Image (cartoon, rainbow, N blue to C red):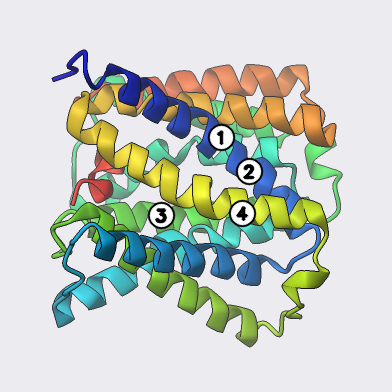
Amino acid sequence: MESKKQFPLIIAAFFAIYVIWGSTYLLNKIAVSELPPFLLAGIRFLTAGLIIFLLAALMGKSLRITTKQLKNTILAGFLFLSFGNGVVVWALKYVDSNFAALEISAQPLLVLLMMWLLQGKKIQPMSLVGVVLGIIGIYLLINQDIVIEQENAWLGIGLIFLAMLAWGYGSLFVQGADFPKNYFVNTGYQMFTGGIMLGLMSLAFGERWSNPLSWQPSTHWAMVLLVIFGSIVAFTSFNFLLKNVSPEKVATNTYVNPIVAMILGAYFLQEPITKQSVIAALILLTGVYFINTKKKLLLLSRFRK
């Protein structure tokens, strides 16, 4: 499966899902300091979706979609991007990027609990250990003066949790839903519709729209990197890996992204890394490992179509 010819591409793809996805927390944190969150996320995904459509057309891929598939991509785009990502960007106004990345690393724990509550799936003993470790890790992460003393920190924590719920429910929804067969086209529709909904959310919340020419250079760079690398390159790399390596290898991004976010946040934004955060990260990510011991991972399934 992992042929020598593809090996350089596999290495490059792993770099994308490890480093690029890990860096999106920093990039969003930089951009949201100037732009309102829903506008920022809306521009990112709408632009990325349009570029994907253009690339798909140039590659001769059909953009045809049925009414049912369109409805499903709209719902998935809302759960994953409009709400799931847009609310996280909003939360970054109140919490550090490294904290957000660590909290979100508990996503597999939440999905496991949702499968138990909504689908009646039994939690295996190994996964149960992961749940306990995950709860301990989250408690240690949140229960720090340096976190809760920040203005509106609890609002940021709550927003991230709501976004995780949306992402988790979306992961369950896509299992049996009908989507365009080509994953590139599917991703394009989710980003395009998600971007439009984020724009409508921006208007509904009365966000102030500004002329892109007036943005700070750092915001321009952050937006360009988020669109090209964070959205298009990383998502394409993720799909490529799912077809060429085992799912459990791809899932290692769950452990690496928070570490990358912590390092970048500390270096570029001087975000503090406390001993308790490091301990919480080790416990939390160990819990995620126990949860992800199954070979088929629900969190990856939405990218396979």
**Residue at left offset 57%, top offset 51%:** 226
Question: What residue would you read off at disc 1?
Answer: 22
Check disc 4 and give the amino acid type: Val
Q: Residue furthest top?
A: 4
Query: Do the CB atoms of the residues marked 1 and 2 lie less than 8 Å apart?
Result: yes
Label 3 – label 4 distance at C-alpha = 24 Å
The circle drawn on residue 167 is 3
> What secondary structure is found at the residue carrying circle 3?
helix
Within 10 Å of the Cα at label 2, are there few (<14), some (14-19), or many (20+) other Cα atoms?
A: many
Closer to viewer: mark 4 or mark 1: 4
Q: Residue furthest front?
A: 58
Query: Do the CB atoms of the residues marked 3 and 1 lie less than 8 Å apart?
Result: no
Where, by quadrant of the figure, is residue 12 drawn? top left
Check disc 1 and give the amino acid type: Gly
- Counting labels gives 4
Which callout, 4 or 1, points at the residue further toward the start of the chain?
1
> What secondary structure is found at the residue carrying circle 4?
helix
> What secondary structure is found at the residue carrying circle 2?
helix
Is 58 located above or below residue 194 in the figure? above
17 with respect to 40 (left or right): left
Is 190 located above or below residue 28 in the figure? below
Query: Do the CB atoms of the residues marked 4 and 1 lie less than 8 Å apart?
Result: no
Question: What residue would you read off at disc 2?
Answer: 25
The circle drawn on residue 224 is 4
Residue 305 percent coordinates (x, y): 18, 52
Where, by quadrant of the figure, is residue 147 drawn? top right
Within 10 Å of the Cα at label 3, are there few (<14), some (14-19), or many (20+) other Cα atoms?
A: many
Residue 78 visible: no
Residue 61 visible: yes
Check disc 2 and give the amino acid type: Tyr
